[in-house]
Structure formats: C-alpha cells, structure tokens
Image (cartoon, helix red, strand yellow):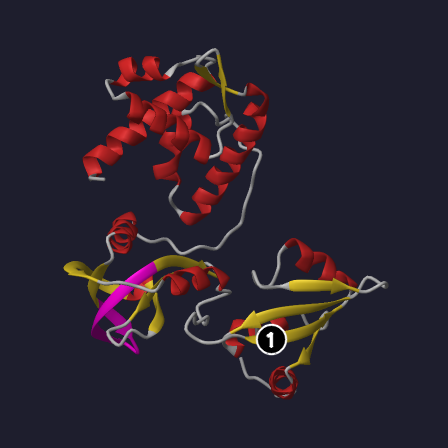
C-alpha cells in the first residue's frame, strides 16, 4: 500500500471508529456511500476494526459498537498514551487518540519506562525495508569507527529500553544492530528471502544476545516463594515453564541460546533464584558473585 493510500485508509478508519463510538449503526452500503468505496472495501474496514480488538456487532444488517466496553477501551488507550510519553512518541499518538474522543482530561495512568528515543523517520525506513524485504546499506558505529554494512532486516526489537534491528549480515549470519548506532541508512533495490522458522524463532528472544540459528539449551532454576510469585506474572522468557512445589517455591525451566541471555537477570534475582542446571552456568554465576565480593572489599578513592 502506497503512503497516500495508507493515510487515506487510516483517516477513514479513525472517522469510522468515531462514528461507532457516537452510537451510529452503519451497513456496508452506508460505508460505501460515506467514503465512496466498493462494498468489498467497506467490509474490509469492518474486518480491520474487528481484528484490532473493537467489539463490532451486527443487527438487522447494521454494524455497531458494543458500548459496554467503552470504559475498558478508554483505560487501554490511556495506558497506551502513558507508555507513548515515555517513548517520546506521544506527539504522534495523541492526535489520533483525541480524534477517537477516548482520552479523559486527566490520565489516571503513570508508567516509568526508560526507552531510547529514536527519530520516527528511522523507524519508518527500517519498517519499509522489512515489509518489502529490501537490503539496507548503512554506516554503523562500532568501537568509535563507522563501518559500511549491508544487512537484511527482519524485525525491530526493544530490549531493556534499547532499540535494535534484528537482521542477517552479508554472510547470512544473524545479528542485532543498535538502531541509534546507525549513522546513515539507505534502502536499496536489492531484495532477499528469509526462512520462516527464523522469523518464528525471533519471538522467543529475551534480549539482543538471542540467536535464532543456534539450537537452544535447557536451563533449570530453583525459585523461592517470592521469585515464583513475580515470575508467574512476568516470565523470564516465552519458553519459561514453572513447576510449583507444595511450599510455594518452584522449579523453572527455560531455553536459551547464549549465557548472556540469562546471566544478568539471574544476578538481579539474587538470592531468590539459584541455577541448578547446567553446572557450568551455575559456576559462571557463582564466579561473578565472588568477583563482586572481592571487588567490594577494596578501598576506592573518590
């Protein structure tokens, strides 16, 4: 879809949502006449809204919005706005939400997320390259040097507040590139293909150390009662499985491809988490703790 067509479609959808929120009941014929589109396109707009989570109902050939969930929708949009403010993109989001008349004068949400602010144009360029499977030519800052690179972008990810583009390099090796370290970006006319399993495996990524091309290994952890409670709410990874014990503690199993995917998280949870398997990972964590204790005993001059 071209940029002009995308903007037109988005404007129509926003107006359509607003009409539904104001209580209008519209048939596909009504939508055809309102926006001068075909019947097929009118039905597609309804399907877009349903897919997006709007509770669109149909009665007597007329579509309407289930207003019983208005408060829930309002709450969701306010939470989205709060997160957008932390990400520095609220100026882009707020006009769209205001058009929907879903934002109260006083937002009841507060979220503190430390997220890098990236220029929207950079995101749009990378997104365009991903959708069209176009190779990106860029200058990448590494060790205080600008390096010319060609990459095959797969996805945009945010790990621990930092933005990355998951990609394949010129050797088809999987890498993650810090977006703010990209100093010049150009979309080429060269296209590429990618195996579906790589894209599917990317959803298992915990942080930038994850590699979808490497066979994962199993990690077994002991979690005390406190860690169990919180890790049930927010898992360490999408592969996490918890086996609860009768005393409130648990054994946690997860799959990772690199030790750096998990070590920092384990150190954050000391003493609530203990590595059981593999033994070499347990030794690695133990050594990190010993190094810290040793360093902590030194005298530092300020």
In terms of image quadrants, where is residue 245? bottom right
Q: Residue at x 32, y 23 (%)?
A: 42
Give the percent coordinates (x, y) of residue 182. 27, 64
Can you say whether 129 is above or below 61 in the image?
A: below
Front residue (pair 124, 180): 124
Can you say whether 269 is above or below 9 in the image?
A: below
Can you say whether 173 is above or below 203 in the image?
A: below
Task: Read off the residue under disc 1.
Answer: 218
In terms of image quadrants, where is residue 139? bottom left
Q: Secondary structure at mark 1?
A: strand
In terms of image quadrants, where is residue 264? bottom right
Q: Pointer 1: residues within 10 angstroms few (<14), some, or many (20+)?
A: few
Part of the protein shown in magenta: 139-154
Q: Looking at the image, which residue sits at the far right? A: 247
Q: Main secondary structure of the magenta part?
A: strand
Q: Residue at x 43, y 62 (%)?
A: 202
Residue 138 visible to the viewer? yes
Residue 289 visible to the viewer? no
Q: Is residue 14 left or right of residue 146?
A: right
Front residue (pair 262, 65): 65
Can you say whether 132 is above or below 172 in the image?
A: above
């Amino acid at each position: 879809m071209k940029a002009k067509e995308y903007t037109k479609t988005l404007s129509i959808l926003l107006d359509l949502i607003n009409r539904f929120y104001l209580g209008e009941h519209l048939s596909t014929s009504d939508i055809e006449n309102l926006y001068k589109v075909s019947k097929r396109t009118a039905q597609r707009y309804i399907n877009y809204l349903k897919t997006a989570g709007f509770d669109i109902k149909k009665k007597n050939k007329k579509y309407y919005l289930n207003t019983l969930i208005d408060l829930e929708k309002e709450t969701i949009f306010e939470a989205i706005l709060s997160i957008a403010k932390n990400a520095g993109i609220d100026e882009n989001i707020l006009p769209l939400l205001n058009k929907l008349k879903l934002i109260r004068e006083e937002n009841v949400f507060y979220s503190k997320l430390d997220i890098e602010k990236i220029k929207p144009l950079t995101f749009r360029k990378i997104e365009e390259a991903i959708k069209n499977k176009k190779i990106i030519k860029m200058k990448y800052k590494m060790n205080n040097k600008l390096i010319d690179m060609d990459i095959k972008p797969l996805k945009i990810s945010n790990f621990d507040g930092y933005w990355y583009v998951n990609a394949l390099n010129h050797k088809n090796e999987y890498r993650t590139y810090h977006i703010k370290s990209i100093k010049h970006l150009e979309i080429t006319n060269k296209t590429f293909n990618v195996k579906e399993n790589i894209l599917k495996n990317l959803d298992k990524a915990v942080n930038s150390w994850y590699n979808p091309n490497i066979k994962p290994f199993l990690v077994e952890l002991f979690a005390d009662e406190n860690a169990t409670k919180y890790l049930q709410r927010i898992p360490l990874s999408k592969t996490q499985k918890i086996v609860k014990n009768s005393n409130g503690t648990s054994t946690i199993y997860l799959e990772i491809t690199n030790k750096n995917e998990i070590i920092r998280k384990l150190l954050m949870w000391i003493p609530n988490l203990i590595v059981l398997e593999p033994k070499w990972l347990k030794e690695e964590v133990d050594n990190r703790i010993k190094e810290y204790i040793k360093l902590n005993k030194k005298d530092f001059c300020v």
